[in-house]
Image (cartoon, rainbow, N blue to C red):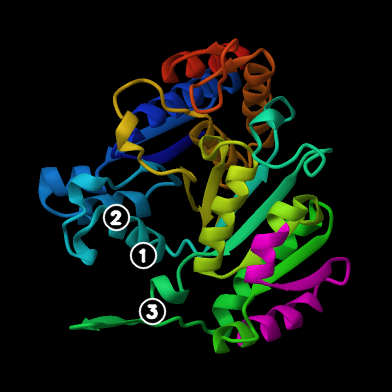
Amino acid sequence: MIYKIAVIKGDGIGPEIVEEAIKILNKIGDKYNHNFDFNEVLAGGIAIDKVGKNLPNETLEICRNSDAVILGAVGGPKWDSLPGNERPEKALLELRKKLNLYSNIRPAVMFDVLKESCPLKPEIIKGGMDIVIVRELTSGIYFGEKYSKGDYACDSMEYSKYEIERIAHQAFKIAQTRNKQVTSVDKSNVLETSRLWRKTVNEIAKKYPDITLNHMYVDNAAMQLVKNPKQFDVIVTENMFGDILSDEASMITGSIGMLPSASLGDNNFGMYEPVHGSAPDIAGSNKANPIATILSISMMLKYSFDLQKESDNIEHAVKKALKDGFRTPDIGKIGEKIITTQEMGNIIVENI
């Protein structure tokens, strides 16, 4: 079978880490007799530089006609002076909206061999951490009405019941495959959107009697993540809260360079990208950690292509590389085997 994949390498370290992910997919294709058809397209800062637009129409059309999308990273200080709608990051928001990728799944898993990199006390993370954050991705304050006038600016947070229902269903379904617990995070003591959020999630919960649901205010959730992260299984929340909490969770694992993400729509279509940004300060130096991107394509095999065995193969190959002591600079220390971006990709290929 041929799987059509749109590839957006993007800016900064994006091209370097995506190349390693493609290397892994080619190895998986050889081993399991799959054909991955890659179609490289432009978005972000590089698209601005080459065609004068952060998201060319051709890119959007090719993504729509693909089975999945791989994204490296977009943005950088080079384009910071541009107006909001013209910045590279706007391309990412438009891709999510126009491809209807309303569900962002971000696992935050503590690898045993990286526990020393965790900033929390050892007794807090004893026994590890395994959380999935399910973030609503195409509504909320990032997509609400915006305007500014002189010394005044306004961003509106908007949600419909339907938008909350579909992300809640996603969270409960994921919880059914895990420890059967969902924590819904909101700010319903202050925000009307959060009151609708809590009411709707409670209604959806009745359809999943096997799942334990609890609610938590976002400020408390931020504190609880560093106080006792093991209490969480699946967290479901709105767009901005999810953005912040998932980054916090990623740093608890030791490095944001380790965490993947999947942005899903209907019919198994998805866009897969690392949680981290474009890191322009190390771009071109062969120092970037490709593991988050490699684990993202592992998620792609599982969620979009239903290739569970192949997905597991990649995860085991990554774990073996780490267990064998190989580290990129962001997760390495003196005395460990510090290697380059390409070397990490090669080692994971060998493990596959």
* Label 2 vs label 3, nearer the camera: 3
Per the model, the C-alpha gap separating discs 1 and 2 is 8 Å
Residue 226 — which label? none
Mark 1 highlights which residue?
Answer: 98
Q: Is residue 303 above or below residue 111?
A: below
First in sequence: mark 2 or mark 3? 2
First in sequence: mark 1 or mark 3? 1
Secondary-structure class at tag 2: helix
Per the model, the C-alpha gap separating discs 2 and 3 is 22 Å
Q: Percent from the top left, x then y, of residue 25?
A: 49, 26
Which residue is nearer to you in this view: 136 or 31? 136
Quarter of the figure with residue 56: bottom left
Q: Percent from the top left, x then y, of residue 269?
A: 50, 53
List the single residue furthest toward the bottom. Answer: 192
Task: Give the residues drawn in magenta, as a range.
Answer: 196-224
At horizontal 33% and vertical 62% (from top left) the residue drawn is 94
Which residue is nearer to you in this view: 271 or 35? 271
Residue 60 — which label? 2
Give neighbour class at mark 2: few <14, some 14-19, many 20+ (Cα, 10 Å). Answer: some
Per the model, the C-alpha gap separating discs 1 and 3 is 15 Å
First in sequence: mark 1 or mark 2? 2
